[in-house]
Amino acid sequence: MRKPVVLITGAGGEIGHGLIDRLSGRKERAIVTLDVSPLDSGIAARVDREITGSILDRAVLDRVLSEYRVELVIHLAALLSTRSEFTPVMAHQVNVEGTLNLLEFAQHEAESHGRPVVFIYPSSIAAYGLPSLEAKQKAGRITEDEWAHPTTMYGCNKLYCEQLGTYYARHYKQLAAETAAGKVDFRCVRFPGLISALTVPSGGTSDYAPEMIHAAAKGEPYACFVRPDTRIPFMAMPDGVDALLALAAAPKADLRRTAYNVTGFNPSAEEVRAVVVKAFPGAQITWEVDLKRQRIVDSWPADIDDTAARRDWSFAPRYDFEQGFSEYLIPTIGKRYT
Ligand code: SER
């Protein structure tokens, strides 16, 4: 029998780096990646097969379908929120049509092998939309089913694809019961802003925190594009990667939802700055508010409630704000730039 495969789309991105780092030590599944750009040398050598191509190209997906027995799809490819506001139609194509292609791919894969394909999808706090700062302050820590009124193209895409995945899981589950064929086992996390010590994001709106840290480590000045009092949830990348893998491995019977909030800590931008300045005393961080980006983060919650993830699949992040900086970000980033 062919070795089972995990297919990772958007593998060259921020989450992909952390994920490949973690998965390449494991032997149970071969890693096949799909990304529009070639992977950098740090991760390329650690995957079994690298395909450079687009998730919008069905011929590429058909080829993967015929060559591999994919039992897990981790669909990371997307345009992030700031970038998507500049090119909303392209964002819709990549974020929605691309996801539809991958869901169809997973469905065909499940049918042809007669067993479910686990489909892991990273959604985002961008799926939320609070109408005003006052409402944001009052709402505090919110659950998955509150305030799901996204204001950005990216947020709309993410929320819709959560529903689309749930549709595939339900609709084809009924068919599967009738035909005994496989189905898509769709599972999704709503991530807060992710902060990685290894890579710097591009095109996101939560990027001010990682940009501030990386700039300070490099000894470069940084003008933060949001107000000091801006508060949204964040998580250290290793916890984000663990969350995806823990959700993928969870027994199906334990999952009472398809979309789960996960979070680590939620400092204000000023609090991030204070920690960064303490770690890198020469850091020059100023404030230069970009109104469009500010409006986006102001519509995102100040905190999210991840009780359901803790209850159903034992989500337990390793890093709080202090440890995230002192044990992961500062030592790892420091090494990277020296
Ligand atoms: N971090 C992402 C962004 O800022 C949100 O998922 O676009």
Image (cartoon, rainbow, N blue to C red):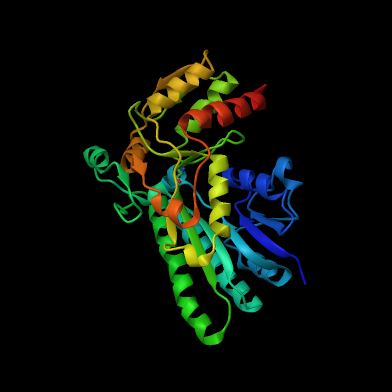
Looking at the rendering, in which quadrant would you find the C terminus?
top right
Residue 131 lies left or right of residue 214; in this view the side is left
Q: Is residue 142 above or below residue 198?
A: below
Residue at (47%, 65%) from the top-left corner? 165
Residue 307 at x, y percent in the picture: 39, 50
**Residue 286 appears at what percent x and percent y?**
42, 20
Instruction: Tell me what residue is drawn at x 32 percent, y 56 percent.
Output: 145
231 lies left or right of 220: left
Quadrant into which the N terminus falls: bottom right
Q: In this rendering, is residue 74 above or below 240?
A: below
* Whether residue 76 is visible: no
Task: Write the residue at 66% across / 27% down.
Answer: 336
Residue 214 at what x, y percent from top left?
Answer: 55, 27
Residue pictured at 54% horizontal, 24% vertical: 215
> Along the line of sight, which residue is nearer the eye, 255 or 58?
255
The residue positioned farthest toward the bottom in the image shown: 178
Reply above or below: 122 against 226. Answer: below
Viewer-side residue, 11 vs 179: 179
Answer whether residue 201 is visible to the viewer in this image: yes
The image quadrant of residue 134 is top left
Q: Is residue 261 above or below residue 333?
A: below
Query: Can you give x and y, in whole percent of width and height, for residue 287 in the image?
Result: 39, 23
Q: Quadrant of ligand 1?
A: top left
Say which of 301 and 104 sits in front. 301
Name the image quarter holding residue 64: bottom right
